[in-house]
Image (cartoon, grey):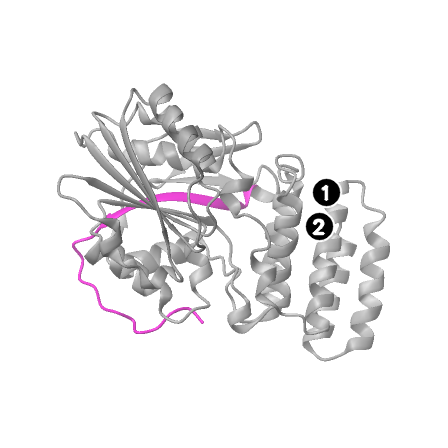
Amino acid sequence: MREDVVDALKKCAEALQHGNPRLANAEMGRVLDLAEEEPKPGTIRLIRFLAEALACRAYGLHPKYFSFPLPDWKNIMCSRHSLFSTVGWAIADVVKGKRKRKVHVIELVKHMDIYDQWMNIFSLVRDWGDLTHLRLSFLVQENVEFSKETEEKLIRASNSKARHIELEYKIIAVNSFADIDVSLLEMRDGEFVVVNCMFVFSKMFSEALALEKVLLTVRDVIKADVMIVAEHDANHSQSDFLLRFDESLKYYSSLFQENLFLSFHPKAEAYHRHQICNIVACEGSNRVERHQTWAQWKSLLTHYGFSIDNLSAKRAFLGNYWPMNRENGILVIRSTEREKQPLFFISAWKTSTSPFKSSGSNEG
């Protein structure tokens, strides 16, 4: 994105913050005029998304639906070499070598579009050591059931790709991940328990104590052997609007520069459009897209009694686009441009022996 466009966007944001609608309107017009001079279609669309978000902020449009109008991230990134498959590799990495014959994977998901990803991931299950029994529990924030067709697909996938591993699966509808009824998970002795949390933790910061409750449940009640956490590596949780806008401008410029999301999935563009709008336009409990940096996540999870379980995968790729490298025991996806800005991370965590003290508060 050219410097004159960045300058106009920042001046528009500053005018809104300082209560100068006339200047904001003038800078908005300059933004839209300059957008037409951009050579890359993806960059033009990003500029329009940012302008739209600023306009929504100007008119006080702060509804929560900006945060999740579409099926969640896993539905967008569900190819064989997707982030979800890489999480599958991460799960395999921590399970193999444990000599466990029974594994229970507990998924925290916003929408029940996850079964497609599990049909992809079954091709990786053969690497999970001596596994003979796999149990999948989906904690879902909507009331749904498996269709007969979905059940048949799962059974066929487990039989054809996973050495006829015995498979169990169930959906548990929850109003909030903070109020999980663990008895419904039917925890069993002898199971290696993995809790998989992809792009859900950052959305809990807008709900008081929600994340703390979930982490304590995973640690003390579920007693997970491993917790997988995948998140955006970005600083979008700041209460200062101008700092948050500046960070989102840098982050999404890198994201759209790669051109992955405009061609990888037909719904990706709309997904990011609404995500940007929530970060820029919304405040208070309406702002649920509160991404944090890896350093912030490491500090927070360590505080809540977890320690890094190093992933041994040396290198993986997300399709033909981004290198995914192992850095300090986690998998990191960085932009290939803009000084290799971090975009996402995938990490594994185990219970730490360190003492824990509740902070009594959550990110505001």
Q: Quadrant of residue 261?
A: top right
The amino acid beneath tag 1 is: Gly
Residue 123: x and y in percent read 39, 24
**Magenta-span inclusion, residue 363:** yes
Q: Residue 84 versus residue 292: which sits nearer the camera?
A: 84
Q: Which residue is mark 2?
A: 46
Q: CA distance from mark 1 to mark 2?
A: 6 Å
SS under mark 1: helix
* Within-10-Å neighbours for mark 1: few <14, some 14–19, many 20+: many
Q: Nearer the viewer, residue 348 or 176?
A: 176
Which residue is painted at 26% across and 69% down in the image? 358
Amino acid type at circle 2 is Leu
Quadrant of res 362: bottom left
Nearer-the-camera pick, 67 or 259: 67
The quarter of the rendered structure image containing the C terminus is bottom left
Question: Percent x, y for residue 147?
Answer: 45, 39
User: Does residue 269 appear left or right of residue 300 in this picture?
Assistant: right
Do the CB atoms of the residues marked 1 and 2 lie less than 8 Å apart?
yes
**Above or below for 1 versus 96:** below
Give the residues drawn in magenta, as a range.
340-364
The crowding category of the residue bearing disc 2, from other C-alpha atoms within 10 Å (few below 14, some 14 to 19, many at least 20), is: many
Quadrant of the rendered image containing residue 69: bottom right
**Image disc number at residue 181:** none
Mark number displayed over residue 42: 1
Residue drawn at (21%, 64%) of the image: 356
The image position of residue 247, as x and y in percent, is: 58, 58
Give the SS element for disc 2. helix
Q: Residue at x 45, y 58 (%)?
A: 202
Q: Is residue 73 magenta?
A: no
**Residue pushed farthest left?**
189
The answer to whether residue 1 is seen in the rendering is no
Please give left or right for residue 161 compared with residue 30 in the image. left
